[in-house]
Amino acid sequence: KKMIYYFGKTRTEGTGVSKSILGGKGANLAEMTSIGLPVPPGFTITTEVCGDYYANGGKMPAALMADVKTNVETLEKELSKKFGDDKNPLLLSVRSGAAVSMPGMMNTILNLGLNDVSTAGLAKATSNERFAYDAYRRLINMFGDVVMGVDHEHFEEAFDAIKKKYKTEEDTQVPAEGLKELCDAYKALYKKETGEDFPQDPIKQLEKAVEAVFKSWMTNKAVKYREIEGIRGLLGTAVNCQSMVYGNMGDDSGTGVAFTRNPNTGENKFFGEFLINAQGEDVVAGIRTPQPTEEMSKWNDPVYQELMAIKTKLETHYSEMQDIEFTIEKGTLYMLQTRTGKRTGMAAVKIACDMVEEKLITEKEAVLRVPAGDLTQLLLPSFDTAAWAKAEKIAKGLPASPGAAVGKLAFTAEDAKARALKGEKVILIRKETSPEDVDGMHAAAGILTSTGGMTSHAAVVARGWGRCCIAGAAGVKIDAKNKTAVISGKTYGEGDELSINGTSGEVAEGSIATQPALLSGDFAKLMVWADKFRTLKVRTNADSPEDSARAREFGAEGIGLCRTEHMFFGGDRTLAIRQMIVANDEATRRTALAKLLPFQREDFIGIFTAMNGLPVTVRLLDPPLHEFVPHDEKGQAELAKELGVSAADIKARVDSLHEFNPMLGHRGCRLSITYPEILEMQVTAIVEAAIECTLKKIDAIPEIMIPLVGTEAELKLLRRKTEETIEAVKKAKNFTGKLDILIGTMIEVPRAALTADEIAGQADFFSFGTNDLTQMTFGFSRDDINSFLPDYLSQDILLVDPFQSLDTSGVGQLVEIACKKGRSIKDKLKLGICGEHGGDPASVQFCHTVGLDYVSCSPFRVPIARLAAAQAAL
Ligand code: ADP
Ligand code: MG
Ligand code: MG
């Protein structure tokens, strides 16, 4: 197996070799060399060697150092310098570089090859004694620190002593004499701390440095970083040994870093910083303030022009925005690194569109290049980047629903609603939210909860509206009774303002400036391309005309899930539903339902109108009834008064609704089986609304969806009742026009998936309710998962939260079975998904693969799903 790949004028072996072997840095150094860019020559030890090192129990492979020596000899010949020479020494940098960039995993060692003899040689060759001893002291320091684990502090102290002696505060003001003394002090220090002399043999130095890079692969911080970033399956890190160039040889030298385009906005303008008379890490270390690269032309125009030419060459070669590192030695430019530049969602869209315009990439490539999830950043207002960076963060929770919100604290939903009505901006801050809070949640600028996960009530509802939300901020201690919250040891009340960042999950004190969403021409352009390539349709989950309209603007092709329960909240509706629930007989129930009917009808008319010409899937009542009634004494007393019954009666009825596992209890289609009059009322409202719309020439296309079905018999019964009701309404309204209403079911109980061939006989469509399906397949309560999910993730038992990204091998198998079985009975059976997964790019890919007709997701995720669907198809 080839262990080392050389790059330089003599030969370049790594061209086209994959990053998994050479690491990102090594592969790109070879690539840049091969297209003729000025790269200091060197060689790359492969990631496989690092893998072997660990396979051997931490032993350097036998033949490695001989191979290293051969490559050093090639370098010596190519550069006419000699490793450890007393006249013109070759120096090397030793740089780590895995296939995936892992910033800060290991410090680079520079100036390797210096010893007492070659430092004198370097001083002679450069006629610059100060420079040579400065390089030597840097090496002893870095080598001691990185390779031998000597505390950097010790070196600092020794340096301070020298600076004191020479009466200066600046490193750069210490004369050559002082640096010579410093090198001696460092060597003594090195011996004291390690028990060994600083190695004078350059090859020995190199061997130890290479091994240190291998070791850095398994340090705690590296392991943790890979864990957090979900980086798996890499062999190890490569080691790049590269001849040194010097940016610290005087005012005609320097070093810098840059992006070929602006990584924040995407603007096609070179964007970077450089520092005159500096080496490597000086730029990042922040010891001196670098200058913007625009200033470079004033300093050395030919070098600047060369850099611009290289920028163009790199972008043409990679067809991608690059992030580069360069050094200028006495007016000569060298390239030290290039890689694909990280960028914001906004920049990703602009760069992709610009590059199509510039004919660097095709429309297909542009669609594939923008990470679908990053579109979120374009759709919502966000905090001003600089202002947010400066703000002090006082708490952190889950980024449950992205965006930025600023407001004063409201501790109850009623307060939030009342104060918002008066025009105040509020943040609703609660331990958790429940369906009773939806009014207040809708009125709030943002929602902050101290418990609950990514699929908690607050999170799901907030995402649906594109309302900014942080869930499960455990550090926030809320005292709802006294309307105060303790965060980071400080108490906040109703008059206090917070800024919450739903994109990062962070909370800051006070009001941080925001910037509005920019749905620029580029965004629209990218969406048009995406629509051209995708086959999967994208619908939305919406239950109000406003959300429907917004989703349409974002490109929704219908509603895949209209939840009717949210329509039962607010004023008279709440009272009517409660009256229905506490009723002891059917007649009272029907009276109460009759009051709800007009509200539901109006709601549906609004939604059908907003969705004119597009299908609207309405789900019949799903949640358990206890969610609609008050559980506290005061609330029950009030309700008793309003309904003219005794408080004891109310309490008895509420108590009787208590269930140990409500999510597995009396809900979904089970409600309609016990109380068919609920189904009758809802279907009547839907059909009456559709008829009214049709008469007004609005094209209403309702689809009725029955939730939580587990057996064919359930659906058969409810389908019959639904059909009977539809016919009854048509007859009552004397309606003879065309109105075809599909009747289908959600597949969210595992049994339904397994018997989908039976159920399909009763269904015109299936919609996978993957929230419940995930919950019932894993047996994880989605409201309680947060108490153990972190342990599952950190121990790799789960790789992702299955409520966020569909578990394709388990839950997905049920989806696949249901699709196959369903279509074996009806080959045209319409299939969709309406769980939270419908807006998750990886899950969308899966939906495409199993052949669903559409995905449905919250309005703000519609563009993400459109792009993800296109990427799945390409
Ligand atoms: P990181 O991956 O942390 O960026 P690098 O391996 O890129 O680490 O090295 C950090 C810096 O060290 C580089 O940006 C460059 O300025 C300097 N450096 C690395 N190799 C050389 C070299 N051969 N000559 C001069 N400077 C170098
Ligand atoms: Mg670098
Ligand atoms: Mg469900």
Image (spheres, helix red, strand yellow):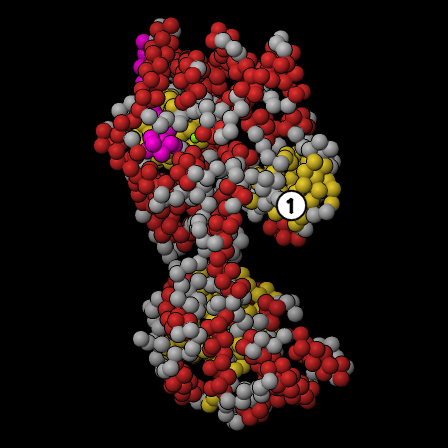
Which quarter of the picture shows residue 139? Answer: bottom right
Q: Nearer the viewer, residue 162 or 316?
A: 162
On whether residue 751 falls in the magenta region, the answer is: yes
The percent position of residue 812, horizontal first and vertical second, equals 35, 41
On whether residue 429 falls in the magenta region, the answer is: no
Horizontally, is 406 left or right of 817 in the view? right
Note whether 73 is above or below 625 in the view shown: below
> Which residue is labeled 1 in the image?
475
Horizontally, is 446 left or right of 74 in the view? right
Q: Nearer the viewer, residue 822 or 202?
A: 822
Q: Nearer the viewer, residue 477 or 361?
A: 477
Quick check: is the Cβ at mark 1 less than 8 Å away from ligand 3?
no
Q: Is residue 608 visible?
A: no
Q: Report the residue at 45% width, 24% height from top.
A: 667
The percent position of residue 717, horizontal first and vertical second, equals 33, 17
How many labels, in total? 1
Note whether 550 is above or below 368 in the view shown: above
Q: Report the residue at 58% width, 75% height from top.
A: 149
Question: What range of the chain is rendered magenta?
Answer: 736-753
The percent position of residue 417, horizontal first and vertical second, equals 64, 27
Q: Is residue 715 visible?
A: yes
The percent position of residue 816, horizontal first and vertical second, equals 30, 39
Note whether 748 is above or below 100 in the view shown: above
Q: Amino acid at mark 1?
A: Gly
Q: Report the residue at 46% width, 26% height from top.
A: 665
Q: Report the residue at 53% width, 24% height from top.
A: 658
